[in-house]
Amino acid sequence: MKKKHFLNYVLSLFLVCYAVLLKAETNMSTLERISNHKVINIGYRDAPPYSYKTSDGHVVGYVIDLCKDVTESLKKNLRIKDLVVNYIPTPVSMRTTMLNHNIIDMDCSVNTDTVKRESVVLFSRHYLSVYTRFGSFGGSNINSNTDLAGRTVSVVKGTTDLFNVNSLNRLQKLNIMVLTQPTMKDSFSAMSSHKSYATAMNEVSLKQLIESSENMKGYQISTLTLGPPQDLGIMLRHNDIALKHMVDENLNTRFNRSDFKQFYEQWFNSKLPGKNINLHLPLSAEMYQYITKKS
């Protein structure tokens, strides 16, 4: 715990110092800054299959690949032969701060597009739609919201899931004890160590954590969902219209390529690179239509 506090302190100090150094460039667009420095900084976090670092040090994932398409376009359009791509670990609670202080140029991980967030950041066209569900030990009865009454639910700090759990708790007076955690892995660990009765997170990440656990058959995912499906997109700086246009063009191209189904299956219905798990989440007709629809 002390190590986490120290790392957060160091990261906060880095943010302050870096922001001071970049103050002279605050009026420069992201594309201008990338063109001048020949560097792009991409935020990511440990959230397979969206983004993660393998044991050999490579940052990979479904969203990382989408962002790689963007970096290739930047090389071509900005005429940068050797564009340096930095992958920067970005805590979920600091992603908007790191974006708007020019620490990262894109957040290429799992990000829910909400009306509230659109007032401070931009989102690309959506790359996935997911429900938030509850993970718990097998045999737990989570069939309705009242089954959570008086229980402890772990959820990641700074997420839409936390907002929705708090709203549910307040509106239905369920007396849920909300246990906030810094990462999805920590939230799942709180449930698996009996600190919470259930954990709430997007169904894809929940499936990945269960598949990666030592006792994957000992857990279950609820059919009960928390709120409507969430639209996920690449997070960009507020008012960064030029970069958003480029990102959206690349996503449109990727989603309408003849090999898109194979690309999707690589991350959701095949063995994940660097991990001995398969999420077994094939591309449904509904999801295919959602992803490939015209923006």
Image (cartoon, helix red, strand yellow):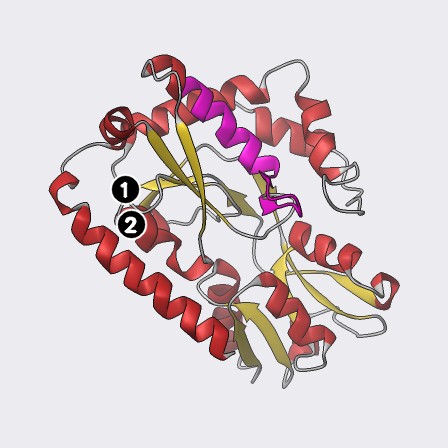
* Residue at 37% over, 33% down: 40
Q: Amino acid at mark 1?
A: His
Residue 66 x/y as whole percent: 53, 30
Task: Pick the residue in front: 216 or 1.
Answer: 1
Task: Pick the residue in front: 25 or 252.
Answer: 25
Q: Quadrant of residue 242?
A: top left
Q: Pointer 1: what residue? A: 238
* Residue at 73% over, 24% down: 262
Q: Is the C-beta separation of discs 1 and 2 under 8 Å?
A: yes
Q: Quadrant of residue 106?
A: top left
> Could you tell me how far apart the alpha carbons at marks 1 and 2 are, in whole angstroms?
6 Å
Q: Is-magenta flag for residue 57?
A: yes
Residue 263 x/y as whole percent: 68, 26
> Does dot 1 land on a helix, a strand or a loop?
loop
* Residue at 60% over, 44% down: 57
Q: Is residue 295 visible?
A: no
Q: Is-magenta flag for residue 120?
A: no
The boundaries of the magenta stretch are 51-73
